[in-house]
Image (cartoon, coloured by chain):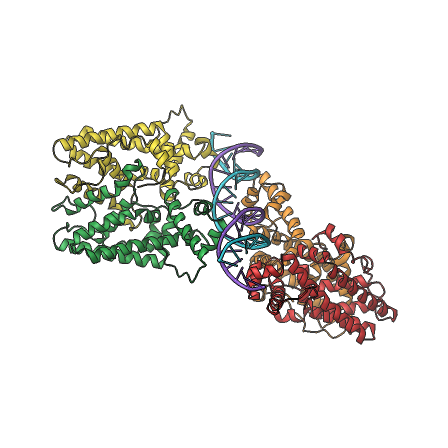
Chain colours: A red, B orange, C yellow, D green, E purple, F cyan
DNA sequence: AATGAATGAGGGTTCATTCAT
DNA sequence: CATGAATGAACCCTCATTCAT
């Protein structure tokens, strides 16, 4: 469940670590990344001291969850790449499945702080880059065989994924269940349009959004 | 700039009030709705006491900004309705202009707390409802004249707007500038598709998302 | 209403001053001497600025009220001394009437701060001393003619007055109305007892309690 | 020292809790119930955080002290009832001993807030009621055997106790030491007087002062 | 190793007092 | 003069983190 180089942990310590990560993921997702650490400890059923023994501060906990999450999405992406030969289908498939993993990614967008932490984590950064590469490959291939409009690039797909995965807060539960898939599908229909309406801005390449570290440090929380 | 029933305020007090609202809007947008009040005061160039004199707590400040923001968007919507006779063009126009106002709306999605405050404000609620009605009218008209796919409803547009206005955090500034318009345009192309890919879920009506108050109270922060 | 050497005040200023004193007396009595100054201004129907123009700080307001109150009690005491020749009757009369003025004195017991302010006010101090002298005279005379037990002194009567004027907080209104008079009467019956139960401690002279300034400064709020 | 249902506290925590209660009792008595919490923490020799961990707010601390205090007085009352067969002697004994505990009761009269808190505490309320019952029993018995004047009732004794326990603030320390006992003794002599001076008001029954909750809520701080 | 107690810095809010209108 | 706006120091309380049991 984690990719840390955790040398060797007593069985019970290992168990505690996993419970903490799972609890933190749930609590962060539900109440934001600024919840009291004590609440996480409670949700994990451990003492606050134990939580701090495993994760010396909030950052390290966020980092661990982020690594975990990116790794899962990356695995998914690789699997799809291996299995699906039609690039458009692969892209749709990946986006919709990534949507299924959205909860594990979303908290990374909740706070400036969380973002900075993830951006600073080399392991996260690397997974993210590979993910973008895969997306870019799918996009190029789909454009090459004419199934996708040509005025977008791999980075646009990353942007779209980010946008849709954030979810909405204004709808009742049942509608939220389907929301990501529903609006991703609309977006995908838009991506097929040829000729489509001219798009404002310019194609966003994966390089444009690769170096979160620097741009984000500057641009901070200003969002769009 | 505000819609409060502010009976009569000395000129300097009035000026301060406006500066506070403007500063708070900026700071909330930039650093989230939980920033220290002191920071808002500093940004507004007033003492913390002045801030509290005008807005007895964070809620009331959030409420004032929210009322302001919704009012602006609503005015825009009405103006477009009056001016533009082609419903599809009206819809595109409105969405893209609303995007220009996104920063003033976005903070309402930043925290559970902010959401609850806005949902509890009758003036906000009313503006929101009228906004949805206008959207719904545009959608019906556009569908009636064949310029929009029939498997969506007014609430879907509300959802789309919400999603896109949240913005992304992963891109450098110049790209974020255009992001909303760019992806809204893609989405609009998807909305023209006939026949489009079958959409997961069901059409979201404006009634579905009208009563934020209750559904949100239950669903809380879980988001999609 | 005041004894200040207030040179000459415009009629409206004078009116404001009196309204403030009256309002402050009421508000202090009802809510303690630490109420927000703003509340006093509101009760007086003046702006906070006006309040501060007349009384540069809380101390001076407390002082003014205290001087006023002591003066009233002192006038009463003198009048009784002039009118009543039987010392026991004079004493009873005075104590019971002072009880009627208790609200204007009581706040001086509410807070250490108020006490210190009054103790530091020469005018108050002088009125207080004269009051004690009068009490002492009554006591000596009553003891001389055999109507009062001999094992008490003038200071004891000051103590008793203080104690009873503080009132109780545990009773409903109607009972509180009569409480001071009722328990003072009991106390007076005790003071007639000859021979009475031996009293703990020693007679408290007026000298014992004259120099509030010093003893109180040390003993502070320790109360009994 | 406390009657809380404190499940099981680590030894050091227990020790801290007791130190806090003791310190708070002293500080409240000395400086009023509105002293900064920090001062209490300092007096107890603990950090402010520890204080708040044990007592989540000022109320709960006041409540704990109040329960403690009433319990002690009640125990005393019961013990005297068991040991002393002469009702008049029992009464005197009790009043004078309760006087020894006055500091622990007195703060309950310092502020409207403290009073409301105590009134709202069921445990306090119950102890108070039992105390009044005991007093009432003593009064009736003493009147039955002719050792007390008949024109008073149990509630009067409650009133007297309240009044005298409040103490005085105008005397130097050595005199304050004996004050309660001294003036209670005078009062008791008054209570023996047969026939005594007719008392203003009417006998106060224990029922009259039993329901602090309601009457006090209305009458508030107006005191006598 | 796990626990939960202790700590204190930091943010929210109030209010005494000063100052511009 | 009267007014009410502006200010900031002070106090309440929370919570991240450290440390004794």
Q: Pick the quarter of the image with the N terminus of chain A.
A: bottom right
- A25 lies left or right of B145: left
- Looking at the picture, how far across and down is residue D199, in whole percent? 18, 46
- C3 lies left or right of B151: left
Where C77 sits versus B27, above or below?
Answer: above
Where D158 sits versus B85, above or below?
Answer: above
Residue closest to the far top: C7
Task: Kindly tell me whether residue C101 is visible in this rendering.
Answer: no
Report the label total: 0
Q: Residue at x 66, y 60 (%)?
A: A62
- Looking at the picture, how far across and down is residue B13, in whole percent? 58, 40
Foreground pick, C163 / C212: C212
Question: Dividing the picture into quarters, in which one does residue B131 lie?
Answer: bottom right
- D85 lies left or right of A169: left
Task: Kindly tell me whether residue B78 is visible in this rendering.
Answer: yes
Foreground pick, C79 / F18: F18
Q: Residue at x 43, y 32 (%)?
A: C55
Residue closest to the far right: A144
Foreground pick, D58 / B213: D58
Q: Pick the quarter of the image with the C terminus of chain A.
A: bottom right
- Looking at the picture, how far across and down is residue B90, in whole percent? 74, 61
Q: Residue at x 15, y 43 (%)?
A: D197
Question: Dividing the picture into quarters, in which one does residue B47 lie?
Answer: top right
- Looking at the picture, how far across and down is residue D222, in whole percent? 33, 45
């Amino acid at each position: 469940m984690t990719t840390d180089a955790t040398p060797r942990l007593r069985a019970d310590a290992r168990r505690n670590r996993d419970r903490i990560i799972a609890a933190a993921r749930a609590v962060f997702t539900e109440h934001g990344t600024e919840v009291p650490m004590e609440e996480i400890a409670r949700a994990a059923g451990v003492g606050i001291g134990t939580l701090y023994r495993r994760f010396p501060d909030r950052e390290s906990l966020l980092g661990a969850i982020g690594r975990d999450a990116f790794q899962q999405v990356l695995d998914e992406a690789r699997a799809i790449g291996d299995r699906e030969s039609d690039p458009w289908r692969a892209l749709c498939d990946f986006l919709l499945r990534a949507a299924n993993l959205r909860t594990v990614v979303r908290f990374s967008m909740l706070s400036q702080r969380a973002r900075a932490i993830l951006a600073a984590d080399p392991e996260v950064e690397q997974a993210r880059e590979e993910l973008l590469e895969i997306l870019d490959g799918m996009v190029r291939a789909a454009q090459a065989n004419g199934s996708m409009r040509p005025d977008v690039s791999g980075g646009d797909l990353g942007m779209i994924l980010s946008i849709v995965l954030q979810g909405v807060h204004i709808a009742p539960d049942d509608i939220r269940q389907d929301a990501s898939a529903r609006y991703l599908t609309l977006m995908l229909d838009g991506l097929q349009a040829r000729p489509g309406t001219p798009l404002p801005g310019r194609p966003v390449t994966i390089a444009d959004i690769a170096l979160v570290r620097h741009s984000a440090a500057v641009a901070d929380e200003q969002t769009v």
